Image (spheres, grey):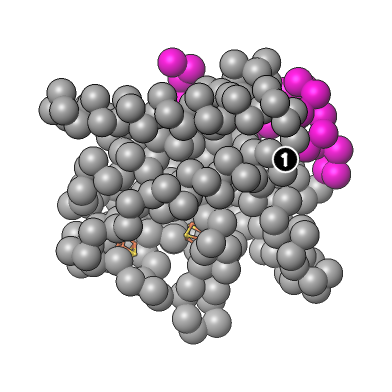
């Protein structure tokens, strides 16, 4: 779920995406400068970004309960992982929190969650996928931008990729995908500009760190490279 969707776009599309990116970067940078480097500041930026997304076009095949794509590796920015963890911890009951922690740690012991091949070969469901029959995302409102961006015009293609355990070109609206995906890059770039160790990380590995080390958020915000072991190998700084 982490391809570069900017390649092959028309000049007009590139200009549009650059405009969205620049506005979002300025917004986040100003907020962090005036309100400080805190998780709630990142959370409010994420909320604003999510509220500004255009709806998924109707022609997309995606619908509630369709979740072939929720068995793929998810890459996120560290601020997204922090905000999602913060929201889960502040809203979940102790039992719910224990349940999610167990699911994340159980997934992590099954194999290398940073490796795309692990997800494809095991068809391991995302720990946030409700496996009790509905196949809904348990954190739908606060899900990562890469999850929001991923969509398909043909569910059968998604299912084929799942069945065959292989990477498959899913038909989609590239501009929509790129316009949603870019918010993750904005969070990475702006937090790097503020002096933080910032790169794309595996969602589940980052959460494993957060669920097992209470000091991780604060240390990261102080500039420590806390999430290095969650860094996706193919991530390269721009
Ligand atoms: S991307 Fe594919 S698997 Fe995921 S919800 Fe859309 S149609 Fe279903
Ligand atoms: S976070 Fe939600 S949308 Fe994303 S892969 Fe997991 S279950 Fe699916």
The picture quadrant where one finds residue 165 is bottom left
Q: Which residue, given by chain and number where applicable, does mark 1 sit on?
A: 39
Q: Position of residue 46 (x, y in %)?
A: 56, 44
Q: Is residue 198 visible?
A: no
Quadrant showing the N terminus: top left
Magenta residues span: 213-238
Q: Main secondary structure of the magenta part?
A: loop
Who's the residue at 20% across and 48% down the image?
Answer: 173
Q: Is residue 44 above or below residue 98?
A: above
Who's the residue at 39% across and 40% down the image?
Answer: 181
Q: Secondary structure at mark 1?
A: helix
Q: Position of residue 168 (x, y in %)?
A: 24, 49
Q: Is residue 31 visible?
A: yes
Quadrant showing the C terminus: top left
Q: Position of residue 67 (x, y in %)?
A: 39, 67
Who's the residue at 49% across and 84% down the image?
Answer: 133
Q: Check if residue 17 falls in the magenta segment.
A: no
């Amino acid at each position: 779920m982490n391809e570069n969707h900017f390649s092959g776009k028309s000049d007009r599309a590139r200009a549009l995406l650059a405009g969205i990116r620049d506005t979002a970067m300025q917004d986040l940078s100003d907020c962090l400068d005036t309100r400080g480097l805190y998780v709630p500041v990142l959370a409010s930026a994420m909320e604003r970004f999510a509220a500004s997304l255009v709806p998924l076009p109707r022609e997309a095949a995606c619908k509630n309960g369709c979740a072939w794509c929720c068995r793929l590796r998810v890459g996120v920015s560290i601020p997204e992982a922090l905000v999602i963890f913060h929201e889960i911890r502040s809203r979940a009951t102790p039992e719910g929190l224990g349940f999610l922690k167990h699911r994340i740690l159980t997934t992590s012991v099954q194999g290398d969650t940073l490796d795309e091949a692990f997800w494809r070969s095991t068809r391991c469901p995302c720990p946030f996928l409700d496996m009790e029959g509905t196949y809904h995302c348990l954190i739908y409102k606060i899900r990562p931008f890469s999850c929001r961006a991923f969509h398909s015009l043909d569910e059968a293609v998604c299912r084929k990729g799942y069945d065959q355990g292989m990477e498959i070109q899913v038909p989609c609206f590239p501009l929509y995908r790129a316009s949603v995906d870019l918010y993750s890059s904005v969070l990475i770039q702006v937090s790097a500009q503020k002096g933080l160790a910032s790169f794309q990380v595996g969602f589940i590995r980052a959460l494993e760190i957060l669920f097992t080390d209470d000091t991780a958020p604060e240390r990261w915000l102080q500039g420590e490279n806390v999430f290095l072991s969650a860094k996706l190998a193919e991530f390269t700084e721009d």
